[in-house]
Image: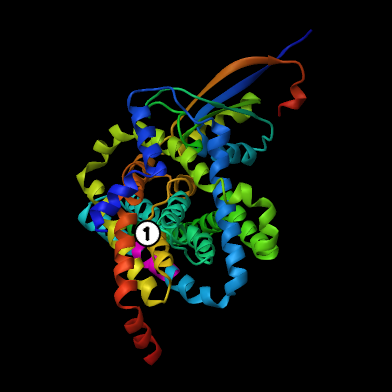
Amino acid sequence: MDILELIQSNLLTPIVLFFLFGIIAARIKSDLKIPDAISEFLPIYLLAAIGLHGGIEMRNTGFEVMFLPMMVAIGMSLLFTLNHYQILRRLGKFNLFDSYALASTYGAVGAVTFSVGLSFIKNQGVTSEGYLAAILAVLEPVAFILAIFLTNMAVSKQIKTRKQSLGNLESMESDLEMGIKETKTNLKQVLHESITGKAIVILLGSIIIGYIIGEKGFESISIVFEDLFVGAIVIFLIEMGIIAGQRLDDIKKVGPFLIAFSIIMPTFNGVIGVLVASVLGLSLGGSVMFGLLLASASFIAAPAVLRHAIPQAKPSLYITSALGITFPFNIIVLLPIMFMVSTIIHDSATIDLFNYLSKD
Amino acid sequence: MKLYDVKLLTVTCEILAQKNVIDILSKHKITGYTSYEVEGNGARGLRGQGLKNEKNVKVEVIMQEEKLQDVVEEIARTLFTNFAIVLYVTNVGVLRTEKFV
């Protein structure tokens, strides 16, 4: 199957069709809406299901195997965040705050995208490593923490140089200290908020519970957490479609540079992710999911974290680009592309890579 | 029945600024407030649709006039530039002034 066929057949899956349907419903100004309680409940449900599956599989594979991929994922997420910042600041001419906010939005992971990815590879008849759920949990706060740290550093540096140019050395000390102090409290708050935030708590909790109950214990709840999974994503994507549809007009406002950025960067990050994961020895499906982790942008967690930590950044920029452009692009076009790349690598080069690695 | 004059401060803001507002209140030793989710239209467009984080809230606080100035000044200074926020003050009468220090 070539890439266009794969994209075409992906377009005709219920998940993508309902997403597009949601966009249309919003465009014709229908009052269709998923009730608030349900659209707040569904991400929690999806994360619980992802966590349970991850936990059960980790019981079979053990913890050691996930260590290297997790470290690599964290490293790449940090590296990509820095890379995004340079591109946005230098080429895109965004201000410091918007650049860091956008950079971390794109360095962070999207749990909804991850769910869609799981059902996509299931549709293609392959599985992925369970520990990717744990990587999802660990990766969530990483990019934000880096961006917030760097923003605060940059701000206190600005204060310092301004004071120096004024020659006002006495008050310089105190302002610098204030900047550093603010950085510390800010970071502490963000760390605390993201680690105790509902996404990570439910994800880690379900991983642990999945690990404890194993496949046997899961049987009794599998009707909810296995059979309903894809259906639940479909309902959630109606809501996502509606919100994306309402924001379509805003896309014009974000400008051509950011539109291009929100398509090119995920593609670049995702394909690199697939390649690296394949070298690390992840399975065909696992490599796609690893790539998706790096390609996805955060649009549920990002505003909550960034609005507090970098309030100067415009939320309309990072929410619109992540939800209105990158999310549809990821689930419709990029997933099939990454699947194709992963298939080609795993078909042809697995043995060579394995030899190469074992010689090392 | 004697009613005592106090001030009612009403802050309508995006839900993610609510924590900042309440932090400022508690900094001025005001612990009591009432808040509820609202929708509306304003300078930042239609609010209250879509994602939970983009909803608006209304925070109501009753306080004595002496504190009002400082609280309002701090909210204006720290939140007005970056957040969707509107505030106004009304005169209200209460029965038990000791509840609203």
Q: Nearer the viewer, residue B22 or B74?
A: B22
Q: Nearer the viewer, residue A307 or A45?
A: A45
Confirm whether the magenta stretch covers residue A77: yes
Taking the view exactly as shown, the residue that stands out farthest to the right is B1
Where residue A356 appears, x then y in whole percent? 34, 87
Residue identified by numbered label 1? A154
Where residue A234 appears, x then y in whole percent? 46, 41
Where is residue B3, by image quadrant? top right
* Helix, strand or loop for the magenta stretch, by majority: helix
Tell me the kind of residue under disc 1.
Ala
How many numbered discs sit on the rendered protein?
1
A125 left or right of B20 in image:
left
Question: What range is drawn magenta here?
Answer: A74-81
Where residue A174 appears, x then y in whole percent? 48, 59
**Residue A47 visible somewhere in the drawing:** yes
Q: For the point 30% across and 34% down, which residue is it?
A: A248
Where residue A193 appears, x then y in whole percent? 57, 52
Q: Quadrant of the N terminus of chain A?
A: bottom left
A55 left or right of A357 in image:
right
Q: Nearer the viewer, residue A245 or A212?
A: A212
Q: For the point 37% across and 43% down, which residue is it?
A: A16
